[in-house]
Image (cartoon, helix red, strand yellow):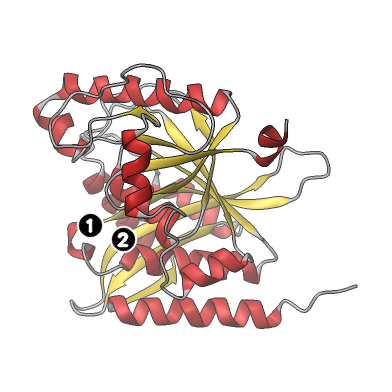
Amino acid sequence: MTIDTAPLIAKAHAQAEAAARAAAVTIRELTEPKDHAAAAEIFTRVWALEPGQSLMPTGLMRVMAYEGCYIAGVYDDTCGDRLIGAATAFLASDVEPRGGIHLHSHITGMLPEANGRHAGFALKLHQRAWALSRGLRRVTWTFDPLVRANAYFNMAKLGADATAYLVDFYGDMPDGVNVGQGSDRLLMSWALDSARTDVAANGTRIEPQIEPQNEESLLSANKVLLSGIAPGVMPDSGPPPDFGGPLLCATPAAIQTLRRDAPELARSWRFALRGALTGAMGRGYRITGFTRSGWYLLEQHEENERR
């Protein structure tokens, strides 16, 4: 039976357009070399690259756009149609038997002028509508699990799922943000046609199924893999938690500031979070959400619970 996807695609485009209007931006595909050069400059500024360094060369973006990949720019409607953000994504094959094709979002960068306007949210909804229009049903990407704002954005604002912890995924990254800090990443998977994503696309946050009082009960019951969410403190793994049931795992406050002012403390957080999350996920836990206060929520797979 053929499923009519036209209503889903039309709704996705409407949600993306509404988000762009709310953010006072226009998002469009970049097809010309001059636009790709402008996008490359955005990435250079966001990642504080040295002269001669490049995360995404102009020529590569030109070829990707020509061959049907996703290269898009965010233009500020309040400042003369100025480019303030960009994103690149390419087609990828699923590794499962008889797997299909999905979109992998490789680099997204936004200038400070976009802060507080939810322009990043509008950009992801544009990417979703673009992918659905081409018969794709999933987008993947990676992000640094130490960055609270990105964790909350990916899970609560978009409704995406964390599927794997990738240790030192990119190797040594010599840019001005990641140098000397390792490149661990969480792999995200975004089901574009799910009810959860549709709710998120309408602006409703996907909060973890845990109330503040239950969060306190988990803390008092030592259901904590890693603590230390207050600014500037060392991560504390403490005694082994009582595995079974939900667990919490802390993230550092303002990791970008720590990397600049206290790089060794930032590195301590890298290794502590790596050990906590990979250890729990090796026991059959998965990350199911992220709280406003900076905790990952982990729960056991249903099949492991049944065992």
**Who is closer to the viewer here, 167 or 299?**
299
Helix, strand or loop status at disc 1 = loop
In this orientation, does residue 182 appear? no
Point out the residue furthest to the right here: 1
* Left or right of 173 in this view: 80: left
The C terminus: image quadrant: top right
Point out the residue furthest to the left here: 261
Residue 227 sits in which quadrant? top left
Location of residue 35 with respect to 154 vertically, above or below: below
Location of residue 281 with respect to 147 vertically, above or below: above
Location of residue 247 with respect to 61 vertically, above or below: above
Residue 49 sits in which quadrant? top left
Please state the horizontal and vertical placement of residue 45, each as a whole percent of the image: 22, 47
Residue at the location (50% across, 64% down)?
A: 127
Residues packed near mark 2 inside 10 Å, few (<14), some (14 to 19) or many (20 plus): many
Spatial CA span between label 1 and label 2: 6 Å
Please state the horizontal and vertical placement of residue 105, each as a whole percent of the image: 50, 50
Kind of residue at disc 2: Gly
Which sits earlier in the primary sequence, circle 1 or circle 2? 2
Q: Is there a contact, CB below 8 Å, between mark 1 and mark 2?
A: yes
Q: Which residue is mark 2?
A: 85
In this orientation, does residue 199 appear? yes
**Who is closer to the viewer here, 148 or 83?**
148
Q: Which residue is mark 1?
A: 111
Residues packed near mark 1 inside 10 Å, few (<14), some (14 to 19) or many (20 plus): some
The numbered mark at residue 152 is none
Helix, strand or loop status at disc 2 = strand
The N terminus: image quadrant: bottom right
Please state the horizontal and vertical placement of residue 26, each as a whole percent of the image: 35, 76
Residue at the location (27% across, 32% down)?
A: 175
Residue at the location (67% across, 61% down)?
A: 136
Kind of residue at disc 1: Leu
